[in-house]
Image (tube, rainbow, N blue to C red):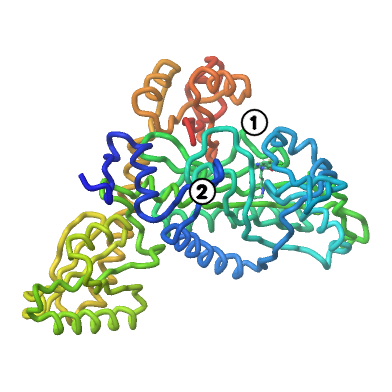
Amino acid sequence: MSDIGVTTKKSENFSEWYTEVVLKSGMAEYSPIKGCMIFREQSYAIWEKIQEVFNRKIRMMGHRNVYFPMFIPESLLKKEAEHFEGFVPEVAWVTEGGSSKLEEKLAIRPTSETIIYATFAKWIRSWRDLPIKINQWCNIVRWETKATKPFLRTREFLWQEGHTAHSTKQEAEKEVMDILNEYRDIMESYLAIPVLVGVKTESEKFAGALETTTLEAMMPDGRALQMGTSHNLGNNFAKVFGIKFIGEDEKEHEVWQTSWGISTRLIGALVMVHGDDKGLVVPPKVASVQVVIIPISYKNVDSNAILRKAEEILKELKANSISAVCDDRTEYTPGWKFNDWELKGVPLRIEIGPRDLKNKQLTVARRDTYQKVIIKEKEAAKETKTLLEEIQNNLYSKARKTLEEKTTLVKDYREFKKTLKEKGGFLRTSWCGSSECEENIKEETGATIRLRPFTKEESKSNCVCCGRKAVEMVYFARSY
Ligand code: 86X
């Protein structure tokens, strides 16, 4: 088999298939630094789409973008010792500048709470200064010791981090949920990846938060992937950084805060969920190229007329806000181009050959189903739009079906272990609420509680681990 295309089957060796797809499709490239990857054209374009969509959403909610330094003085990071203790082994440091040793070493940001909240303390005096709602797009460095994987776990990655400060607890709580809902919309309506949403347990939440909410997706290999988080920070950071304001009541109060983030990890999820044996499949709403037009002419017969037709269709699609390109390269055969665009995941391919030209028709091939349909040349824009919508919906329903198939209600520990071993996925089960049982299960099976649903699902059975009375139903899984 040629080494241009994907040679591993998704169903046979998922991990190898994934690596092959991200490299060969032009999404990722390895770098000279262990654990750091290059985000190539095909993946960066998707990241820019995510940025575009999320920026629009948060602007409407009243957030503004900012940029803070990537260096955090050690003393500032250590101020938060309690909340960051577990993370310290992952911090990368700068100790020298030019040829001189720094007086104080600088952390390369693993997240920006400390530098941003130290600054909030300067900005906030009165209730009139609130709320503050800011966001930044930046790179983050965490010196992972676990095995890295392109997009899912790299030592440097890209994300957005939102940070807000409010005068009331209710306002902060609402902010956490509003952001969570916008995240859900990006994941489900744009990336076509269904997610479960809920609350993290005490042991899984961010130590600096009162409550961590999460969005979790299911990958085809049965492992869960955290897609984003939105934290209610309460007054925890206000206490450490002295972020106080004089209220309308003329008394001093601590601010109520939130923080939230999504990262380039989402791109990895998109590859895993939608990709197939021929490569990437990009949902139309985040595809930078939605349609590729391929003129097919044999040895000059009609070739000029076909090219002109292709240009005409291209213009027509663009005029209708469809992102299209015409691949008129002569140095490649149509067959080679088909494979190449399939590998890159372009949702629709329009072929124009002599017969199409003669019949005033277009042959359209769907990336998701490989189905070919003939459409009238005159209806190119309308039909293309409809097909793109159908592809978007089909990708979502397929992923939804997988999520449902991979969610199992388990009644006892024997069933829990058996299901986890044989099929993986989400295990919906009863839990007594103790960290002890949670820890035992993690030790014994590697599965963790991914979330507690927002609307408590009452349980009539006993805890899957200890057999005592259960307080609620939760979702366990092995995860990335
Ligand atoms: C937790 C919390 C929070 C803003 C988010 O989840 C979304 C965006 N931040 C991030 N977290 C850390 O605080 C952290 C800290 C250090 Cl020092 C580290 F090395 C790694 C970390 N990982 C996660």
- Mark 1 surroundings within 10 Å by alpha-carbon count, few (fewer than 14), some (14 through 19), many (20 or more): few
Q: Is residue 168 left or right of residue 456?
A: right
- Mark 2 surroundings within 10 Å by alpha-carbon count, few (fewer than 14), some (14 through 19), many (20 or more): few
Q: Residue at x 70, y 52 (%)?
A: 258
Between 303 and 116, the one nearer to me in the picture: 303
Q: Is residue 304 left or right of residue 46?
A: left
Asked if the beta carbon under badge 2 is closer than 8 A to the nearest atom of ligand 1, the reply is no
Q: Label 1: state its secondary structure.
A: loop
Amino acid identity at mark 1: Ser
Q: Which residue is mark 2?
A: 31
Between 260 and 267, the one nearer to me in the picture: 267
Residue 234, percent from left and from top:
75, 46
Residue 5, percent from left and from top:
27, 50
Amino acid identity at mark 2: Ser
Q: Is residue 347 left or right of residue 140?
A: left
Q: Which is closer to the viewer, label 2 or label 1? A: 2
Residue 388, percent from left and from top:
29, 66
Q: Residue at x 13, y 69 (%)?
A: 374
- Ligand 1 quadrant assignment: top right
* Label located before the other in sequence (2 or 1): 2
* Figure quadrant of residue 376: bottom left
Q: Which residue is mark 1?
A: 203
* Figure quadrant of residue 411: top left
Q: How far apart are labels 2 and 1 at the CA level?
A: 35 Å
